[in-house]
Amino acid sequence: MPRIVFAPAIQRHVASPAREVAGTSVAAALAAVLAEQPALRGYLLDDQGRLRHHLSVFVDGVAVRDRQWLSDSVRPDSEIYVVQALTGG
């Protein structure tokens, strides 16, 4: 099963340990986490269910392409890393 890891900056807001989750897409993996830990939903997703702008998700070190539907596929041995995005001005 894919492993999902939340960066320390996210854990300051809602503690969420790394875990293995079922799913063949980023969306399915996140849904599995949110089913176990609904307090993360408001921090990760907006009211339309899309990834918030201040977050980035990487699958096996590569940024996801589909930030709207999170349809990027994951393999059983994938690592999904959710991190707070850096912005500059």
Image (cartoon, helix red, strand yellow):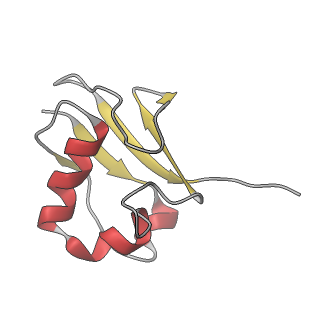
Quadrant containing the C terminus in the rendered view: bottom right
Residue found at x 21% / y 24% = 77
Q: Position of residue 23 (x, y in %)?
A: 15, 37
Quarter of the picture containing the N terminus is top left
Say which quarter of the image contains residue 46. Answer: bottom left
In the displayed structure image, the side of residue 61 where residue 25 appears, left or right: left
- The x and y percentages for residue 55 are 53, 55
Location of residue 11 with respect to 53 vertically, above or below? below
- 60 relative to 68, above or below: above
Q: Residue at x 25, y 33 (%)?
A: 25
Residue drawn at x 28%, y 65% is 16
- For residue 23, above or below residue 50: above
Instruction: Give left or right: position of 88 versus 77.
Output: right
Q: Residue furthest right?
A: 89
- Which image quadrant for residue 68? top left
Q: Quadrant of residue 54?
A: bottom right
Who's the residue at 13% across and 63% down the image? 35
Q: Horizontal and vertical percent for residue 85?
A: 61, 53
Between residue 65 and residue 19, name the one nearer to us. Answer: 65
Q: Is residue 77 left or right of residue 60?
A: left
x, y (%) of residue 37? 19, 69
Viewer-closest of 14 and 35:
35
